[in-house]
Amino acid sequence: MCLGIPGRVLDVYDGAGLRMATVDFGGVRREACLSYTPDAAVGTYVIVHVGFAIAEVDEAEAHRTLAVLRSMAEAVEGELGEPLP
């Protein structure tokens, strides 16, 4: 299973001819391609899947989704007794 994770665009730059961004996922930062979200700008929340921002979302939805993902990790750890690697 692959997830799309919401994050906030911190900066936008040209990477070898592609519109790229540094995206913050609640403290974890990764690079993402913005080719599928041409209107995304600094401060925009995007859903990132395998390195591509595939959709824009509002801040409230991004925070709700991150909360659900965090609670799932805690549930798995509760069941297994340790976090998934």
Image (cartoon, rainbow, N blue to C red):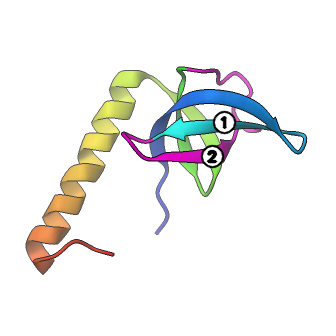
Which disc is residue 31 wearing?
A: 2
* Residue stretch in magenta: 25-42
Question: Residue shown at 56%/28% (left/top)?
Answer: 10
Q: Residue at x 69, y 32 (%)?
A: 37
Q: Position of residue 79 (x, y in %)?
A: 10, 75
Question: Given the image, on which type of amino acid does mark 1 rest?
Answer: Ala
Point out which mark residue 21 bears: 1
Looking at the picture, tell me which residue is in the foreground, 37 or 10: 10
CA–CA distance between discs 1 and 2?
6 Å
The reply, left or right, for residue 68 in relation to residue 59 is left
Q: Amino acid at mark 2?
A: Glu
The answer to whether marks 1 and 2 mark residues whose Cβ atoms lie closer than 8 Å is yes
Within-10-Å neighbours for mark 2: few <14, some 14–19, many 20+: some
Precedes in sequence: disc 1 or disc 2: 1
For the residue labelled by badge 1, is the local secondary structure a helix, a strand or a loop?
Answer: strand
At numbered mark 2, what does the secondary structure look like: helix, strand or loop?
strand
The magenta stretch spans residue 9:
no
Q: Is residue 29 magenta?
A: yes
Q: Which mark is residue 82?
A: none
The foreground one among 39 and 8 is 8
Location of residue 1 in the rendering, given as x and y in whole percent from the top left corner: 46, 69
